[in-house]
Image (tube, grey):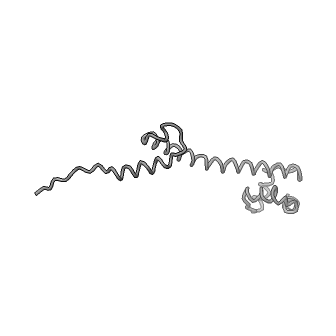
Amino acid sequence: MFVLMPRVKSSPVRRQRHKKLLKLVRGFIGRRRTCFRIAKQAHIKACLYARRDRKKKRAVYKRFCINAVNFYLRCNFSVSYSIFIAILRRNKIYISIAALYYLACVLRNYRWFALVISCFY
């Protein structure tokens, strides 16, 4: 025995899903904001770009720190960054680039660098 039921086209669920996505693409321009299918593609692309650029931001910050530490070392000790890092690695002193930047450019800790260079160079 079959009971005939009306066909359900999942309208409330679809509307919720569309509203959720269209809320995420609110700042986009043109049909990327209003048309669901195009907005979905734009959102996927935006997420990919965001992930890529987070990685790129870290790489840019690393280069910035290396340049700043290199400038500090060359001005104060006439030693390049690569030689200084080689000194540290040879003596098993492992310190992050960000920490070196903090010591050199934020704290301007001259004595620590002078101690490392005079003892190990």
- Residue lying farthest to the top in this orientation: 30
Closer to the camera in the image, 87 or 64:
64
Quadrant placement of the N terminus: bottom left
Residue 120 visible within the image:
no
Q: Is residue 53 left or right of residue 111?
A: left
Q: Quadrant of residue 85?
A: bottom right
Q: Is residue 108 left or right of residue 99?
A: right
Quadrant placement of the C terminus: bottom right
Q: Is residue 24 left or right of residue 107?
A: left
Closer to the camera in the image, 52 or 25:
25
Residue at 76 percent of width and 62 percent of height:
93
Residue at 78 percent of width and 58 percent of height:
102
Residue at 72 percent of width and 48 percent of height:
63
Residue 47 visible within the image:
yes
**Whole-percent x, y for residue 33 in the image:** 49, 41
Number of callouts in the render? 0
**Whole-percent x, y for residue 94 in the image:** 73, 61
**Whole-percent x, y for residue 57 in the image:** 65, 48
**Whole-percent x, y for residue 23 in the image:** 49, 49
